[in-house]
Amino acid sequence: MGQRQGALESLGMTETLWRGRRVLLTGHSGFKGGWLALWLHRLGAQVTGFSLPPPTTPSLFELARVASCTDSHFGDIRDARALAALVEKTQPEIVFHLAAQPLVRRSYADPLETYSTNVMGTANLLEAVRLKSPATRAIVVVTTDKCYENREWVWGYRETDPLGGHDPYSSSKAGAELVAASYAKSFFSAPGMPALATARAGNVIGGGDWAADRLMPDLLQALLAGQPARIRNPHATRPWQHVLEPVRGYLLLAERLHTQGPAFAEAWNFGPLDDDAKPVQWIATELTRLWGTQATWVADPGEHPHEAHYLKLDISKARARLPWKPALRLGDALQLTVDWARQHQAGEDMRAVTLAQIQHYQALPH
């Protein structure tokens, strides 16, 4: 236990704050939500999950047996009545909102689903907390780095830069940011009300992601099948980071909201160091090198909908005030992702593998 406490202290986190704490996590059946649920359970929190069923087969939710460490409820964030009933019943002290339609290309195919889920789903949750849960002290609404009005410039976006979005997904997340900001100012600024912040992360990678039309799952599935990986937009640059990096940011932010309230009720960026924002082709080349066995990739020459070409985040505020900074370089993040995939391929217990990676990450210098 002494080692574990030391690791948590090095992360700037307080284990005693989480032990027995009632936490509501929307999107717990998803990739990032699954990692967060397992870490919260490891910290001793009582986690209630609300989400659609896992969106893929296989899924991290099933492989890591996330349901066994949460009070798991399947439902649609657009169902305001069901969501409000669960919030009223569970009286969460801390809320993490990750439920979303998270895919750019899917947003082109079904923009109404994207807007109703990402914008109205966020409003449904905040309204439920406002009306039904006087116990709630902290809310973290997770959006994305793509919520910014993309200027295709080479420096990182700051939290004060204009919101926008060319595609329905990006603009829906900008909309979720506006909804959260309005609730924070209109309803959650009075004494005794919860402190609300938004969190904007970069492109996350890690074990357990099988979402369609994402670079890392597409690459890994091709490599597992022994086929050349096909990639879109090889020259597009993104702020890549291991999933545990922003998850730690969410946890730290929730702690500050719970203990210090309005001082941290703002928007926050969680991204990699500047030189870990790499082109897609760099990621593909490095991943195939780590995978070995003559793995290769090729550019997909087909027609593809518009996506941002260049995107970086300025993380100065998180580094100075939380304090939070990346603990993994991109090469290490890719190695952890490959290790997870290899162990899944070998039939290992993926709950144990995932928890071991969380423990390894906690022990890193931060």
Image: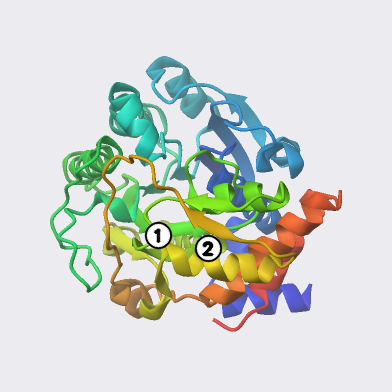
Q: Quadrant of residue 168?
A: top left
Q: Amino acid at mark 1?
A: Pro
Tell which circle, 1 or 2, labels the residue nearer the N-terminal end. Answer: 1
Residue at 47 percent across and 70 percent down: it is 282
Relative vertical location of residue 170 with respect to residue 13 in this rendering, above or below: above
Residue at 64 percent across and 71 percent down: it is 289
| Tag shown at residue 234 | 1
Please say if the residues under marks 1 and 2 sit with CB atoms less than 8 Å apart.
yes
Q: How many marks?
A: 2
- Chosen colour scheme: rainbow
Q: Which quadrant does the C terminus fall into?
A: bottom right
Residue at 34 percent across and 26 percent down: it is 109
> Which percent across, then down, holds residue 133?
42, 33
Q: Is residue 358 visible?
A: no
Tell me the residue that label 2 is attached to: 284
> Which of the two residues, 76 or 106, is positioned nearer the viewer here?
106
Q: Is residue 274 visible?
A: yes
> Which percent across, then down, holds residue 39?
64, 56
Q: Quadrant of residue 57?
A: top right
Q: Secondary structure at mark 1?
A: loop
Q: Is residue 255 left or right of residue 345?
A: left
> Which percent across, then down, holds residue 201?
39, 58
